[in-house]
Image (tube, coloured by chain):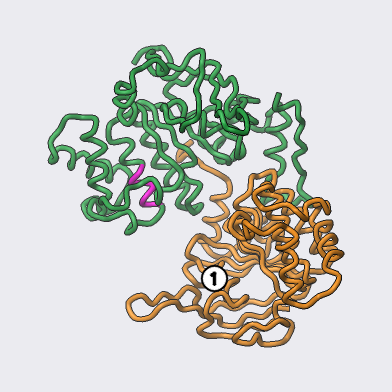
Chain colours: A green, B orange
């Protein structure tokens, strides 16, 4: 492991040229990531997901990614050949998305999919890949890995599906995992279980994690550092423990407008948006 | 205002038979706000759907304002009870203007002064009369949910059934809708039944609530008890703990 950061992002912009005009989804985002847990928080349309996607080269057309620097482990991602990027993506950097119902292949068993993900990147026989997959299913706390291996996605619950997804994304031993709302489609109790699994794996393997979510409270309890995005920009960067000391009025407003189980406030404070925040 | 006794909802038959709600009872007094909390599959939404007649009632009784609801819900029922759904993107007709959406219940119930009632309903939910001729796709998520609420209150019902009314919305918009619901209840003396997976939202809007799990009632408690932690079941305690976010073991 070198001292240079795992991921360097400098002045990242994502634009969509649409018939109705150009939409700037991400504007001048700069951050670097080591082997740590970084949270990116924002409301819908803040550009948090597009930031994550552009790192993996998954910006959908007609999107355009411009950056002064976008480098993974010292290698420039923007000038890289598509083939090389594909090698990197899925092996050294991977992504877990929100809903396992839509991100798993419905006509392949859970196990076959993990085997496929492994063999796509690492030269190996079926037997070896199968063993890897079973190990991985066990690592995400599946009670009977052998049985789950043979199940189709519709036969597993949301929480199990998301664990299978995580197993698939970690089977190649990546250095960077981008998790885009990985628990938002799940029940609260399942949510915490998934986070516990993710937390342990990230710590054990010394990976970098980018955790994208709309849930400021959850992210700050899980990550080391949090970027708060608004209208495509990072408006504030916070150490996770210092959420209470947030300076930006947007971050404070976002914290304040959540109903709190333990404090009764009527009516709830409402966020007043200042056009200056988007500038 | 509403009494539910031993409600059962069963879907399918034979091997596919699923008991979605199994013997749930509760009562809501007029002007009260009652919460149904639970995770997916707990049957909380099915209870609401059974009340409005969208889910089959296999057993038990449902009374609204002292009257047992008829098997086929009549106009009297719908003039008293209206529902707001979770997804404002899915619950509004995409090819109808706001004006058409709000006219429909008025036409069904043969009410006069439609224009005045529509403008008034829009005003009540904090939207101007200029919204009348817009289509749902021209509105934000929060504005759509306001329209869905306007559609529900335009018949001047006494009860609103709210099925996760804010869970598709951003946190800042959620606060606005929760404040709107609270104001409407205070102004019009409405009775609410609110379904939500979010304990904090339920505790904010409701005085009393029922925690559900796998079709059954776990415990009936109050928002006050949630706050002070005086709950009896372990499951409710787990839910309370989950609202506090992630905690690292040993940290």
Residue plotted at (75% across, 67% down):
B103
Q: Main secondary structure of the magenta part?
A: helix
Q: Please provide percent x and percent y for residue B78.
A: 70, 77
Would residue A238 be found to the left or right of residue A147 on screen?
A: right
| SS for callout 1 | helix
- Give the position of the C terminus of chain A as an image quadrant: top right
Judge whether B185 appears above or below A121 on screen. below
Q: Quadrant of residue B66?
A: bottom right
Q: Is residue A226 visible?
A: no
Residue A217 at what x, y percent from top left?
59, 40
Which chain does tag 1 point to? B
- Picture layout, residue B216 above or below residue A245: below
Q: Nearer the viewer, residue A57 or A30?
A: A57
Q: Quadrant of residue B152?
A: bottom right
Looking at the image, residue A92 lies above or below residue B207: above
Give me the residue at 38% from left, 45% from top.
A103
Q: Position of residue B72 (x, y in %)?
A: 61, 85
Asked if residue A160 lies in the magenta stretch, the reply is yes
Residue B9 placement, left or right of B177:
left
Q: Nearer the viewer, residue A217 or B45?
A: B45
Q: Residue at x 35, y 43 (%)?
A: A165
Q: Is residue A24 magenta?
A: no
**Which quadrant holds residue B233?**
bottom right
Would you name the residue on which mark 1 appears?
A: B46
Residues rendered magenta in the picture:
A159-165
How many numbered circles does the render carry?
Answer: 1
Label 1 CA crowd tier, 10 Å (few <14, some 14–19, many 20+): many
Of residue A85 and residue B8, the one placed in the foreground of this image is A85
Residue B196 falls left or right of residue A93: right
Q: Position of residue B210 (x, y in %)?
A: 61, 68
Q: Image point 65% across, 65% down: which residue?
A: B35
Query: Along the horizontal axis of the image, is B34 left or right of B213?
Result: right
């Amino acid at each position: 492991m070198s001292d240079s950061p795992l991921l360097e992002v400098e002045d990242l912009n994502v634009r969509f040229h649409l018939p109705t005009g150009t939409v700037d989804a991400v504007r001048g985002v700069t951050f670097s990531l080591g082997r740590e847990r970084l949270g990116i928080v924002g409301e819908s349309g803040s550009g948090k997901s597009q930031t994550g996607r552009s790192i993996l080269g998954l910006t959908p057309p007609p999107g355009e990614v411009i950056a002064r620097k976008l480098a993974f482990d010292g290698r420039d991602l923007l000038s890289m050949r598509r083939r090389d990027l594909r090698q990197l993506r899925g092996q050294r950097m991977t992504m877990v998305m929100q809903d396992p119902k839509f991100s798993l292949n419905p006509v392949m068993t859970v196990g076959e999919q993990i085997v496929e993900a492994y063999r796509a990147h690492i030269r190996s026989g079926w037997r070896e890949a199968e063993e890897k997959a079973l190990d991985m299913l066990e690592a995400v706390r599946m009670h009977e890995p052998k049985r789950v291996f043979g199940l189709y996605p519709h036969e597993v619950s949301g929480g199990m599906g998301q664990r299978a997804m995580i197993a698939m994304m970690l089977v190649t031993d990546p250095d960077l995992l981008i998790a885009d709302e990985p628990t938002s489609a799940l029940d609260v109790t399942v949510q915490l279980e998934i986070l516990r699994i993710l937390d342990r794996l990230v710590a054990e393997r010394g990976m970098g994690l980018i955790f994208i979510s709309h849930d400021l409270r959850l992210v700050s309890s899980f990550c080391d550092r949090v970027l708060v995005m608004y209208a495509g920009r990072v408006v504030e960067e916070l150490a996770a423990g210092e959420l209470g000391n947030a300076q930006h009025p947007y971050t404070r407003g976002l914290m304040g407008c959540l109903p709190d189980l333990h404090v009764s406030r009527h009516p709830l404070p409402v966020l007043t948006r200042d056009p200056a925040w988007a500038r | 205002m509403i009494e539910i006794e031993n409600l059962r909802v069963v879907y399918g038959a034979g091997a596919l038979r699923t008991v979605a709600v199994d013997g749930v009872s509760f009562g809501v007094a007029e002007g009260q706000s009652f919460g149904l909390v639970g995770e997916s599959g707990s049957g909380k939404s099915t209870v609401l759907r059974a009340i409005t007649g969208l889910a089959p009632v296999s057993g038990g009784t449902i009374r609204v304002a002292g009257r047992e609801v008829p098997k086929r819900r009549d106009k009297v029922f719908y003039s008293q009870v209206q529902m707001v759904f979770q997804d404002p993107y899915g619950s509004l007709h995409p090819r109808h203007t706001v004006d058409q959406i709000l006219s429909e219940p008025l036409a069904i119930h043969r009410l006069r002064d439609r224009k005045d009632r529509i403008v008034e309903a829009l005003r009540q939910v904090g939207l101007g009369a200029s919204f009348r001729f817009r289509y749902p796709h021209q509105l934000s998520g929060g504005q759509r949910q306001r329209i869905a609420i306007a559609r529900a209150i335009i018949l001047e019902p006494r009860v609103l059934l709210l099925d996760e009314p804010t869970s598709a919305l951003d946190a800042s918009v959620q606060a606005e809708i929760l404040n709107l619901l609270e104001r409407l209840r205070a102004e019009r003396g409405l009775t609410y039944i609110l379904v939500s997976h979010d304990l904090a939202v339920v505790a904010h809007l409701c005085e009393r609530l029922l925690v559900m799990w796998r079709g059954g009632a776990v415990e009936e408690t109050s928002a006050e008890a949630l706050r002070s932690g005086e709950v009896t079941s372990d499951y409710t305690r787990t839910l309370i703990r989950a609202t506090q976010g992630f905690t690292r073991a040993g940290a």
